[in-house]
Amino acid sequence: MDDTAAVVATVTDYFEGWFDGDAGRMERALHPALAKTGVRTDPAGQLATESMGAADMIGWTREGEGVARKPAGFTFDVTVNEIYHEIATVTVHSPVYREYLHLIRTADGWRILNAVYMNVLET
C-alpha cells in the first residue's frame, strides 16, 4: 500500500471507528500521545476549547458516543494535503465534523498525533 492509501486507511479507521462504535479501529488509528482539541463558540459568543487524548477517544468510542451522533446516510471526504517523509496533514469534511489532522509514520504504520475539529452542527 502506498503512503497516501495508508494515510486514508488510518483516517477511515478513525472516522468509521467513531461512528460505528469500534474502539479497536479507533485505537489502531491513534498515536498514544494524541492531542485533540475541539473548538466552539460558547453561548456568550466566546471561543471555547476542549482537549482530549487517545484514552478519551477510545473510551468514548467504546461507549458509543459517535454512534449516537451518526446521521442517516453518513459520508465523509478525506483530503491528504501533504505527505512529507514521516509526517502528513489531512483535512476531513463530514456533515458532523470538520477536522484537521496531523499523522506520523510509526513502526506500526500511520497514526494520528494531532487533531483540531469543530462540530459543523454547532456552528
Image: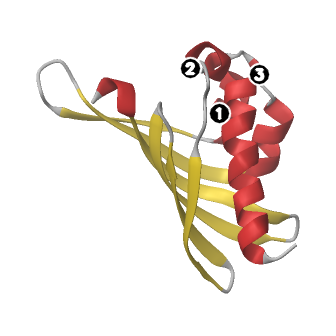
Q: What residue would you read off at disc 3?
A: 62
Mark 1 Cα within 10 Å, few/some/many (few <14, many 20+)?
many
- Whether the residues at callouts 1 and 3 have beta carbons within 8 Å, the answer is no
The label on residue 57 is 1
Secondary structure at numbered mark 2: loop
Disc 2 to disc 1, C-alpha distance: 19 Å
Q: Position of residue 3 (x, y in %)?
A: 76, 75
Residue 112, compared with residue 3, is above or below; it is above
If you read the primary sequence from the N terminus, does the residue marked by circle 2 or circle 3 appear first?
3
Looking at the rendered structure, the secondary structure element under dot 3 is helix
- Gap between marks 1 and 3 measured at Cα: 9 Å
Name which residue lies at 65% across and 56% down.
Answer: 112
Return the x and y of residue 71 as percentages of the image width and height: 56, 20
- Quarter of the rendering containing residue 42: top left
Left or right of residue 70: residue 30: right
| Amino acid, disc 1 | Met
Image height check: is 82 above or below 66?
A: below
Tell me where residue 19 appears, x and y as whole percent.
67, 27
Quarter of the image for the N terminus: give it: bottom right
Direction from residue 123 to residue 24 in the image, left or right: right
Tell me which residue sits at (80%, 31%) in the image.
Answer: 23
Residue sitting farthest toward the front: 73
Q: Nearer the viewer, residue 24 or 119?
A: 119
Residue wearing tag 2:
71
- Name the foreground residue: 102 vs 121: 121
Amino acid under label 3? Arg
Residue 55 appears in view:
no
Q: Residues within 10 Å of mark 2 (few under 14, many from 20)?
A: few
Between 78 and 119, the one lying in front of the other is 78
